[in-house]
């Protein structure tokens, strides 16, 4: 079973906090959740909405129909009524408006409760949560405990006040809508889970990977990473620096990387555009760095608070000149933690930039992920710093020729010797050169790292569904994995055999290994991307020589929907 | 104990008579006199004739991007604040392409020493005007004369929060070395603006010109007086160039506030592994 709960209201009135609270409550009650927030690029005014899909199975995408809609204003109902399931429960304030249609009205006297308890408008959220839990057959145990944590620092009185509002909302439903209560959130036994966004998953992964320097300039939808690592800074010891611009961000991170600490930066497409000169420097100086890009619809300022996957080719080609880099794109929140750990290792092992791609959908949506499994993975993880050394003798050469293309990297400060990391072409010892022979040696050395990577660390795409039986095979990357997962499930319910090929290791690609995945000419391969040009398709055409006749491309700023897949079957 | 020779890298490719020669020697002298070795200092180089010093001086160096040497140095210092960090940059590098970094590094009081080669031209790209060029100066990029008035680096640094602002002259190696040493002894953001003739592309700001217009601040001058310091900075309008420490004040350096345990460098701190306490926030 899956249900979708949605709340909407005016921006600036706590919709986001309330949505997250609901996600945590549902998770604590034993369910899996996936949520998504809709908000304009404004702080006040405009319409905010937050929806949570809960499931007793895994859930990785939103559901088409809304089952419970909380309308903190009339606009919420007008905007979302078309998505409401037949007999959806609509929570509303009868003093404000009355919803009509094939719905079940659940009147909650918000205005009267606020008056009675002398609460501020923002308390409507808490009332709404109490009412939602009542109508979905839950109790207030988890909510009360979460309120106690959330307002703990503000003191017992504030906690009690909030709990009182929750109780009021709960009681109103019990007394006036008893007959409409259905068991959507009955308490279930389930292993402990964490509710994280993609941004938090990256931030958590970075801490676990022993990243000690993170720099960023705030840019939606990547800013959540900066906020998280900054909030943890006192505990973790990570130096987190909000620099003057993205150019300073990446150049300072490369300075820190040179000095020997794991370093990372995060941004969206526009900020990445400012970073590419330094990305190229990371290539020639062979300094490790992890670059987190959370995409949003461009070009230029585009649609800052919506989602798109239109920076794949930009990331892959970002930077002037020819140099190796690795591009990874986690498909979901758990993979974000795992690939972030891997990204820091790969950056150190191959001494190059590793780009971790996200998008607004993955970055800002929450998902419940298994607590113990993540903790076990993180505790087992030991950073692999590759050929980093802390001492060397006078014969040390920073850019020494090696078979695998990787040279020992000395942490500055080691006595008896010294070297320079040089953005000019250089000799093995780091000094500048314009020699044709030395130039070719260094270009080839750097390129050898890619060969080594492809044989040692490249991982072929994963498949979801039965690829042998499937006649229709969807192909995608990044956050598309979530919706594709749901589409394959849905197709199975419809007794259709479909599968999905998912790319997480996007660049460089092993041509031969990829080609065999597409060798069955009786199958129909359909490219699915959240952009207008089919960038993964272009990449596969260029790197592997395969092309797609059939494509699902969405570029209205909204996430791909299961129905778009089903239409193609 | 290191010697001048220990710091000597490749033979410089600077033009004969270029002020860079003197600056290079002064920097090495300062390092030797401070008891440093090539293994004990990190230098971030910009791009230009000045940045080319990367091959001519021995140290842990990073020859980065044009305009970005200060940003790079900021990262170096935060990662390992137990090593002295220096940025060797030009006027175009520091006040043009990297102007934003300069401004904010002043505010942040990062403990880095910035040696600016101020020769009023872009030497390496054959003599176009720099941000410090006098209004009206003609060059290949400004055949009718530059329209902008020059940047006033000293006033800019003082007003934006730098805690050590000094000026010296490429024709006086001893004064340069002394000034650089004082910059290194200071904790915080220190700039040393070196007035430097470009013998190839600038026929006005020559050694003779500067020798006529520079003067040394004497012991009666108080570098702690911010207003007096600004007045000194403004003397550039009368073509008077004070040499010495023009302004100095004391404020916590950036790393002293940003690094959790300031007694240990970031790189030497133990790995954080208390992952559970963070994870509980997500339950």
Image (cartoon, coloured by chain):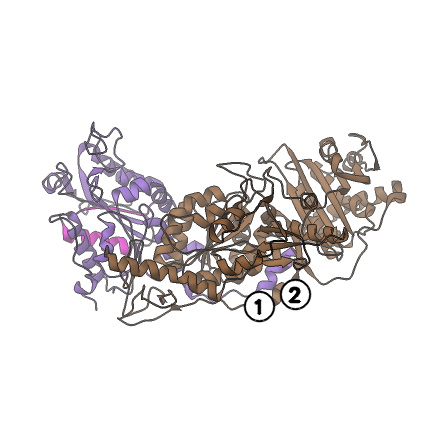
Write down which chain is painted brown: A
Q: Which residue is mark 1?
A: A379
Residue A80, x across and y down, in percent: 72, 36
Looking at the image, is B176 positioned above or below residue A122?
Answer: below
SS for tag 2? helix
Query: How many neighbours does mark 2 have within 10 angstroms: few (below 14), some (14-19), or many (20 or more)?
Result: few
The answer to whether residue A216 of the structure is visible from this angle is no
Write down which chain is painted purple: B
Q: Which residue extends farthest bottom?
A: A393
Q: Is residue B171 left or right of residue A331?
A: left
SS for tag 1? helix
Residue B170 belongs to the span the image colors magenta: yes
Along the line of sight, the residue nearer the viewer: B147 or A338: A338
The chain that hosts pointer 1 is: A
- Label 2 and label 1: CA atoms lie apart by 10 Å
Q: Is residue A489 left or right of residue A325?
A: right
Q: For the magenta stretch, what is the residue range?
A: B163-185
Looking at the image, is A272 positioned above or below residue B41?
Answer: above
**Residue found at x 75% / y 42%:** A65
Residue A262, x across and y down, in percent: 44, 60
The tag on residue A211 is none
């Amino acid at each position: 079973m899956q249900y979708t709960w949605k709340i909407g209201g005016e921006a600036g009135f706590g919709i986001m906090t309330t949505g997250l609270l609901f996600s945590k409550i549902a998770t604590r009650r034993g369910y899996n959740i996936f949520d998504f927030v809709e908000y304009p690029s404004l702080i006040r005014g405009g319409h905010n909405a937050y929806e949570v899909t809960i499931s007793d199975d895994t859930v990785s995408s939103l559901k088409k129909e809304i089952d419970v809609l909380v309308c903190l204003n009339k606009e919420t109902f007008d905007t979302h009524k078309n998505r409401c399931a037949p007999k959806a429960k609509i929570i509303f304030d009868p003093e404000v408006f009355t919803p009509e249609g094939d719905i079940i009205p659940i009147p909650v006297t918000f205005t009267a409760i606020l008056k009675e308890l002398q609460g501020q408008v923002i308390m409507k959220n808490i009332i709404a949560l109490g009412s939602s839990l009542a109508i979905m057959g839950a109790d207030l145990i988890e909510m009360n405990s979460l309120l106690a944590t959330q307002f703990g620092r503000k003191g017992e009185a504030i906690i009690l006040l909030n709990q009182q509002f929750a109780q009021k909302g709960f009681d109103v439903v019990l007394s006036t809508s008893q007959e409409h209560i259905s068991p959507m959130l009955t308490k279930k036994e389930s292993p402990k889970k964490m509710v994280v966004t993609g941004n938090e998953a990256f931030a958590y992964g970075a801490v676990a990977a022993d990243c000690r320097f993170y720099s960023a300039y705030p840019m939606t939808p990547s800013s959540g990473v900066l906020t998280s690592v900054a909030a943890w800074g006192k505990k973790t010891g990570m130096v987190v620096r909000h620099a003057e611009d993205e150019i300073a961000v990446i150049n300072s991170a490369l300075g820190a990387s040179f000095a020997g600490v794991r370093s990372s930066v995060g941004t969206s497409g526009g900020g990445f555009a400012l970073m590419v000169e330094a990305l190229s420097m990371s290539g020639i100086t062979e300094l490790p760095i992890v670059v987190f890009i959370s995409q949003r619809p461009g070009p230029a300022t585009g649609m800052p608070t919506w989602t798109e996957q239109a920076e794949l080719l930009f990331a892959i080609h970002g930077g002037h000149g020819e140099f190796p880099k690795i591009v990874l794109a986690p498909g979901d929140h758990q993979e974000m933690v795992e690939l972030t750990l891997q990204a820091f290792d790969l950056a150190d092992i191959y001494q190059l930039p590793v780009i971790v791609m996200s998008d607004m959908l993955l970055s800002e949506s929450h998902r419940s992920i298994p607590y113990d499994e993540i903790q076990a993975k993180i505790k087992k993880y030991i950073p692999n710093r590759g050929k980093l050394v802390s001492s060397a003798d006078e014969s040390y050469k920073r850019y020494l020729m090696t078979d695998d293309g990787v040279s020992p990297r000395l942490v500055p400060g080691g006595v008896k010797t010294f070297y320079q990391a040089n953005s000019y072409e250089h000799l093995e010892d780091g000094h500048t050169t314009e020699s044709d022979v030395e130039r070719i040696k260094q270009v080839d050395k750097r390129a050898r790292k890619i060969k080594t990577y492809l044989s040692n660390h490249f991982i072929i795409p994963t498949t979801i569904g039965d690829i042998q039986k499937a006649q229709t095979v969807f192909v995608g990357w990044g956050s598309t994995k979530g919706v594709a997962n749901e589409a394959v499930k849905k197709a199975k319910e419809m007794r259709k055999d479909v599968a999905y090929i998912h790319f997480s290791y996007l660049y460089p690609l092993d041509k031969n290994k990829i080609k065999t995945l597409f060798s069955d000419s009786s199958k129909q391969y359909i490219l699915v991307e959240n952009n207008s040009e089919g960038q993964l398709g272009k990449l596969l055409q260029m790197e592997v020589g395969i092309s797609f006749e059939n494509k699902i491309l969405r570029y209205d700023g909204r996430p791909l929907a299961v129905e778009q897949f089903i239409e193609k079957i | 104990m290191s010697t001048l020779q220990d710091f000597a890298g490749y033979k410089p490719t600077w033009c004969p008579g270029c002020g860079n020669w003197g600056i290079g020697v002064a920097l090495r002298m300062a390092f030797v006199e401070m008891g440093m070795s090539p293994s004990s200092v990190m230098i971030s180089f910009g791009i230009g004739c000045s940045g080319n010093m990367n091959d001519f001086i021995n140290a842990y160096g990073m020859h980065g991007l044009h305009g970005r040497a200060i940003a790079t140095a900021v990262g170096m210092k935060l990662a390992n604040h137990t090593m002295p960090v220096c940025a060797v940059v030009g006027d175009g590098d520091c006040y043009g392409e990297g102007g934003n970094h300069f401004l904010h590094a002043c505010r942040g009081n990062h403990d880095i020493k910035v040696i600016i080669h101020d020769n009023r031209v872009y030497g390496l790209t054959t003599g176009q005007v720099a941000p410090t060029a006098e209004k009206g100066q003609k060059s290949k990029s400004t055949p009718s004369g530059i329209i902008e008035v020059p940047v006033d680096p000293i006033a800019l640094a003082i007003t934006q929060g730098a805690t050590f602002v000094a000026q010296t002259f490429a024709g006086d190696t001893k004064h340069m070395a002394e000034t650089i040493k004082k910059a290194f002894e200071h904790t915080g953001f220190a700039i040393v603006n070196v007035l430097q003739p470009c013998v190839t592309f600038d026929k006005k700001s020559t050694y003779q010109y500067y020798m006529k217009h520079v003067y040394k601040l004497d012991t009666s001058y108080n570098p702690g007086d911010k207003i007096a310091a600004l007045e000194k900075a403004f003397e550039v309008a009368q073509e008077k160039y004070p040499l010495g420490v023009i302004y100095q004040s004391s404020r916590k350096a950036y790393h002293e506030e940003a690094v959790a345990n300031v007694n240990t460098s970031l790189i030497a701190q133990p790995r954080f592994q208390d992952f559970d306490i963070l994870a509980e926030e997500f339950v």
